[in-house]
Image: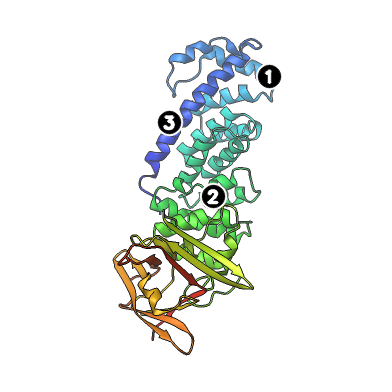
Amino acid sequence: MTDMGFWPRISAAVFLFLLILAGLFWAQISSVQNRVPLADGTMELLGASATDRLPEPLLNAAMNRLADAPNDQRTFNLLYVDTMRSDAAKAEKDKVGNLLSRLGWRYSAAQQNLIASAIVQRDFETIVKSADSLLRREQTPNEILELLHLVEVEPETQPVLVKQLESNPIWKKAFLTRPESLKTQAQVEARGKTLKLMLEADHELDRSDLAPSLNVMANAREFEAAYDIYRTIQKTEKNGVLNDPYFIQLAESANALEYRPYPFEWTKHSKRGMQVDSIESIGKVEVRIRWDGRGTPLVLSQFLNTSIGSKYRVELAGLDATVKLAKQLQFALLCPEGYTRFEDAQEDPKSNKLILRSTDAVICSFPRFDIRGRIQDVSRPQEISLSSINLNPDN
């Protein structure tokens, strides 16, 4: 569904493009002023509105120049501007626009003119293709990317975008990894559909391409779509509710540059006076948590796909998995409506695990599972080691 605020933002984008276009237009005229008769009469345009036809002498000069140089992109662009301002039939305008799109792909002003006309006509294919031409030449990249993020909400745009991204253009990474550009719920929903189409078309997408968008989708509570994409890209079958219960992936990510976790994986949180390390030794991994004992710092978290109305239990293993640990850490499932805590810690002599049970049933789907420090009677440094954590239904 198209966002109701879409067209006001498009209008603002058009205004910005026209400002850029004006500068390029006058630079174009200045560049030809000393070598062709096209300069005659150009100064009359300074006071003209955006809908005025171009002066007759300028049009005649343009026609004469095209007779001598039929491939002149700049001159043809001027005639395109005049045609768009005229009362010519749509078929004639489309013909001129089609010629310019083929002829002027190396000329920034031509592509911006095509975009401006395409926005009015809701021609999303032209918008995407002309934007691609500009971005490949690194022309006004921020403004063009902003425009693509706006038109992405249109269902007609997404297949064209996916097709254009198939060739891995230089702007692909910037388009996918600017989550701050997804400002509305409609844009977030559209991004999920775009990513789904890209995966179905076997696009090459890595963690750095996907993680920013999936995290924005989770924060906007578009969990179903985000989780569907996450399950699609998983190479191994997930067992249980928690992802990475033995912290193996967390340990591997410690050495990865610019690692971005997906929302359904462990996120390490940082705070002054707290340190979280995952250490691998002889095929096993330990998570070591050190903090100064002050406050209730958030240590680790991940979003879970749980069942509303069900109760769960946390199972902990490691050197410090004793009842004492329950006095150092607290566990909870957070929902917008409230939270479910895990209490009543008991040691299981059969499995040598510490088990904590939820006090209430889960009240939302996809809650965030939080591990935090507990407030201590005395503020002194705490150090905890864990080798695994599991969350299972408590029947």
Quick one: label 2, few (<14), some, or many (20+) residues within 10 Å? many
N-terminal of the pair, mark 2 or mark 3, is 3
Q: Is residue 131 visible?
A: yes
Residue type, label 1: Ala
The N terminus appears in which quarter of the rendering?
Answer: bottom left
Q: Is residue 45 above or below residue 371?
A: above
Mark 2 to mark 1 CA distance (whole Å): 44 Å
Percent position of residue 261, x then y: 52, 59
Residue 132 placement, left or right of 348: right
**Which residue in the structure is indicated by mark 2?**
176
Between the C-alphas of marks 2 and 3, the distance is: 25 Å
The image quarter in which residue 34 lies: top right
Could you say where residue 207 lies in the image, as x and y percent from the top left? 57, 57
Q: Tags 2 and 3 in contact by the CB under 8 Å rule? A: no
Q: Secondary structure at mark 2?
A: helix
The first of marks 2 and 1 along the sequence is: 1
Q: Nearer the viewer, residue 98 or 202?
A: 202
Q: Earlier in the sequence, mark 1 or mark 3?
A: 3
Under circle 3, the secondary element is helix
Marks 2 and 1 close (CB-CB < 8 Å): no
Looking at the picture, tell me which residue is in the foreground, 1 or 56.
Answer: 1
Residue at the (70%, 18%) spot, across then down: 68
The residue under label 1 is 67
Q: Nearer the viewer, residue 16 or 303?
A: 303
Please state the horizontal and vertical placement of residue 232, each as a whole percent of the image: 56, 66
The circle on residue 15 is 3
